[in-house]
Amino acid sequence: MSEIIDLTLSELRKILDRKELSSKEVTRAYLDRIQETDGKIRSYITVTEKDALAQAERADKRISRGETSALTGIPLGIKDVICTRGIKTTCGSRMLENFRPPFNAHVMERLLSQDAVMLGKLNMDEFAMGSSTENSAFFQTRNPWDLERIPGGSSGGSAASVGARLCCASLGSDTGGSIRQPASHCGVVGMKPTYGRVSRFGLVAFASSLDQIGPLARSVKDCAVLLEAISGHDSRDSTCLPASVPAYSEACIEGLQDFTIGVPEEYFVEGLDPEVEKAVRSGIEALESMGARIERISLPHTEYAVAVYYIIATAEASSNLSRYDGVKYGFRAKEYSNLMEMYKNTRAQGFGPEVKRRIMLGTYCLSAGYYDAFYKKASQVRTLIIQDFKKAFEKCDAVAAPVAPTTAFRLGEKVDDPVQMYLSDIFTIPVNLAGIPGISVPCGFDSKGLPVGLQIMAGHLQEEKLFRAAFSLETALNLQIQWPEL
């Protein structure tokens, strides 16, 4: 079994196409691995064994006819914020604990059209609000490199499952760093595409102008393959871009001879762990060794990004989460004497403390007399952050920086200090505010043996540049894929 679950997506594709293994055998190996090991990690909320084996059987028939696509028969994990028809989609919340969507998200339609295999739904911070997966209403997910530490969030289950070899690759969502930060903490590759590159149809909304679905995988090329499969226009999402989808996997080539990489001084500040900085600077040197020209740049409005984000994101969350009132679907309180009491009791009992905190913050920011002072002002500063990046990309092809200020912190360490928790996303938030793509690539370990990720950012719809730089970094560092001992 260990030989099967060690294979990358690209390696597995070749073996399945040569019929050296069947998809059913591969799926069974992963299901056995989940049964044996996920009790320690707790990355899955729901394991869909029966459906997975049926999907693998269909994939094997397709392979036998020689009609394979990139993901045919590949076992994947799906973040539990993505709608799956007839299968529980909880968003890590009591509010949707028994919700079974009557439709599939656009990305699920894409995966199932290729006969990919879904192993199950992955744990997350409730409604994607958090940086540690400690806000799940059901249980905490643990980091496979150290079971006493967080895997990151909100896509903690998506990153931990790939790091612990509990799926071949996974999908997560990224609103303020929720793919890249856990990818960094769990030693895997995680990518947030350009806003609108992937349809949000069927992605349960947190902050609609920031949310984006993206891949987590063991290698840059695997990420590229998965992004290619889920990208493309969808008329059901008015923000989805009607742009053609390049062959991202073909952009994974070595060499950066005609490439300029900007290093923003605002990302190397007080509070950045010296060991993280050392690993990231080594990664930047590795990019230089591949031929890239390194240039110091400035993104002057970076210091305002966290404040701007926690106004815009909470305001949009306040609006989006108003639909959970106990009337149409989801949880409803049992005891109430009138309609208003039913609303109040349902929301008080159905939402966890972090979600309530953000709803209250957002409602306050949108309230009469405060809208101009908070939401409008934050939107104006967001425009300045977008302009910072546009100016930077006039001088360079990509920007390199840390993903997070520290490696994975201990479970419970920041749970009672929301401000410290929010600051752990300080380096990832600007990417979401600007709507540009970003990727986290493993670049080493600290002295405790915890993974460090290097973040690469590019301009709108410049994912090909991103994959080229990321693949070159991966090649230059030549870090052999290492697996944590569980």
Image (cartoon, rainbow, N blue to C red):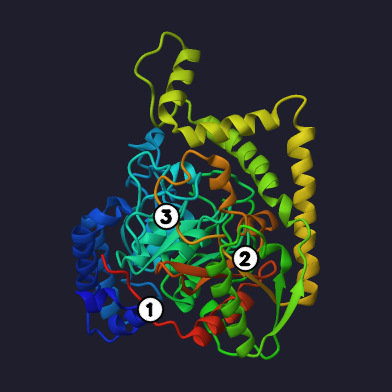
Horizontal side of 116 relative to 219 (left or right) equals left
Residue bearing mark 1: 481
Q: CA distance from mark 2 to mark 3?
A: 20 Å
Q: Is residue 28 above or below residue 83?
A: below
The CA span between labels 1 and 3 is 20 Å
* Badge number at residue 262: none
User: In the rendered image, which residue does mark 3 sit on?
Assistant: 156
Q: Secondary structure at mark 1?
A: loop
Q: Earlier in the sequence, mark 1 or mark 3?
A: 3
Residue under circle 2?
437
Check the image and report above or below for 62 versus 205: below
Q: Is residue 286 above or below residue 372?
A: below
Amino acid type assigned to the residue bearing label 3 in the image:
Gly
Which label's residue is closer to the chain start, 2 or 1?
2
Contact, mark 2 vs mark 1 (Cβ under 8 Å):
no
The amino acid marked with disc number 2 is Pro
Occupied quadrant, residue 251: bottom right
